[in-house]
Amino acid sequence: MGGMSGPFADKYIRYILGWLVLGIFGIYYFGQTSMWLGLTSFLGAFIVTFGFDIVFRQIVKRKARKIVKQKPEALVDVLRHGQEKKGYLIFTRDYVLFVPVFGKVKTVIELDQIVRRQFDRSMVEIIARFPNRYRVFSFTVLFKGKLKELIDEKMGKSQSYKYEET
């Protein structure tokens, strides 16, 4: 039996350890001395798990809004291949952005430029047409179903494999 590995393992470990140490054991241990310490421990577990995620989402939404001047409509947890960076794939009215929590935004794609997308288990490839070439953007996704719905809604039909318009 192998250890817990994968692109999002750290998120799951943070959730499990946060609720085990601060949520369950903290309430039990600190609750014996003071009810306030027990409640503080529970609040700490909530902050370590959900609080960090909420703060990270607000940071990337603000970054996206600053760059494209449009309100983010949806965001999905992803890992960008090649750079091995974790971040969020953000959809606005006219753009798709990969926004890392810590770091600069370097991937901004207009929806009109996207010609093809391909889903393979938890991996998603988005192929975009630029003036001189085609570029492939590969991501590993935490929840493929949510992303597939968003992409189908925003981009319409995927073009043929040879990147030619039909």
Image (spheres, rainbow, N blue to C red):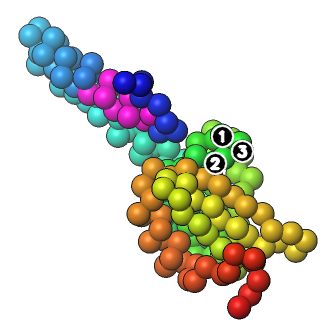
Q: Is residue 13 magenta?
A: yes
Residue at the spot of label 3: 82
Pointer 3 local density, CA inside 10 Å: few below 14, some 14–19, many at least 20: few
Is 103 rendered above or below residue 108? above
In the image, taking residue 89 as reference, residue 144 lies left or right, namely left
Element class at badge 3: loop
Cα separation, mark 1 vs mark 2, equals 5 Å
Horizontal and vertical percent position of residue 22: 26, 21
Q: Residue furthest right?
A: 132
Secondary element at image label 1 = loop
- Reply above or below: 37 against 89: above
Query: Does 36 lie within the magenta span?
Result: no
- Decide which of 10, 33 is in the foreground and name it: 10
* Percent position of residue 8, x then y: 47, 39
Q: Which residue sits at x=41%, y=25%? A: 2
Q: Amino acid at mark 3?
A: Gly
Residue type beneath disc 1: Glu
Within the image, what quadrant is residue 136 found in? bottom right
Categorize mark 2 by other alpha carbons within 10 Å: few (<14), some (14-19), many (20+): many
Identify residue for label 2. 80
